[in-house]
Image (cartoon, rainbow, N blue to C red):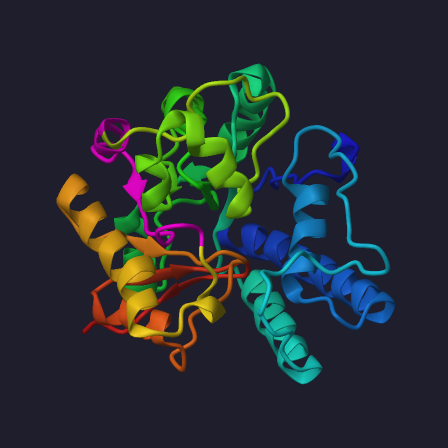
Amino acid sequence: MPDALTEELPDDLSPEAVLAADARLGAELSAVWEVLAAADPAVSVQDALAVLADLRLRPVPAAVPAVRPGSLAAWRPAGTPVPPRPEREAEAVAVTDALSGGRLLRVVNFHDTPLARRAELAAEFAWYAERFDPVGEADVHAFLDTGRWASTRPGLVPAFYDGFASAAQVAVPLCEEFGFTGWFYPPTEFLGVPAAEQRAFAARHHYGVLDDEPGGRLAMTWDELADLATRHVVCGHTATHAASAAVTTAAEVEREVLAPLTRLQEVTGRVPASWAWLGGSPHDATRPGDRAVAAAGVRLVTSNAALQRLPAT
């Protein structure tokens, strides 16, 4: 989208001016939601957020995303139900209210970040650095505890999913060059797959491998993860790339939740800061996998619409 449509910070960075800017974003999100909801009954607020992000969180024109034939709604993992329309409308209102009130972070999701696109990514990070402040796990909890944000600028979390080697080799240096804290969500089994088998594993489990990724190892190593964990935030993302709705039995909970959490804690020395499911579903305490995440002491859940804190156990 043209630069004129990207997010402009007010010259006056007083709390009142920043809140007014957030209120305008909230109004824009509401307008986007109304247009999408009228066009496709299956959309959710995550679809509206994606459109708003392309308008306001990109330094250069975004490519037109591919959509499923006959639908504007985002891809959902097989077996994931579409919530009833009233629930999705209520979520859209809640997210719009949070955006309007400044109770938010900007979270930008990345997957494969190959070397061939480093220059493009560097330009994006330079644009972010002019507008946003880095966010660590402690910053999130401090805000949730006090309701106060330490900076006059909004915070931005660059989130890197699926444990790609390119995240360790390209994204980590860019985060550090531009002063951001990266949040990394590796599916743990992927890191142990032999390099020659990683592409087939990625294809089976819905990993977004870019066409310009050269041959060779796709997954980061455990040593690379241990190293980046000393400076960045490591989170859980199941063992294989599973959706919450697919984790129903005790064996599945063990494989997709408990074993990954144990392994990540062994490697990093701490409980992962947050958790995310394939498809970005929010925490659902009726599901066995979600209950296991909370019981294991993970404090945050990252969904496509919010970073949610779970009650302490």
Q: Is residue 229 magenta?
A: yes
Task: Find residue 253 and report its image quarter.
Answer: bottom left
Task: Find residue 142 and report its image quarter.
Answer: bottom left
**Image coords of residue 72 (percent x, y):** 79, 58
Task: Find residue 33 and report its image quarter.
Answer: bottom right
> In the rendered view, would you say 274 is above or below 125?
below
Residue shown at the point (44%, 25%) measured from the top left: 166
Which of 193 and 69 lies nearest the eye of the viewer?
A: 193
**Image coords of residue 218 (percent x, y):** 44, 27
Q: Left of 158 or right of it: where is 42?
A: right
**Image coords of residue 13 (percent x, y):** 52, 43
Which of 311 and 219 lies nearest the eye of the viewer?
A: 219
Which quadrant of the figure contains the N terminus?
top right
Residue shown at the point (51%, 17%) measured from the top left: 115
Which quadrant of the figure contains the C terminus?
bottom left
Count of labels in the image: 0
Which span is picked out in magenta? 223-241
> In the rendered view, would you say 82 is above or below 187?
below
Which of 60 and 166 lies nearest the eye of the viewer?
A: 166
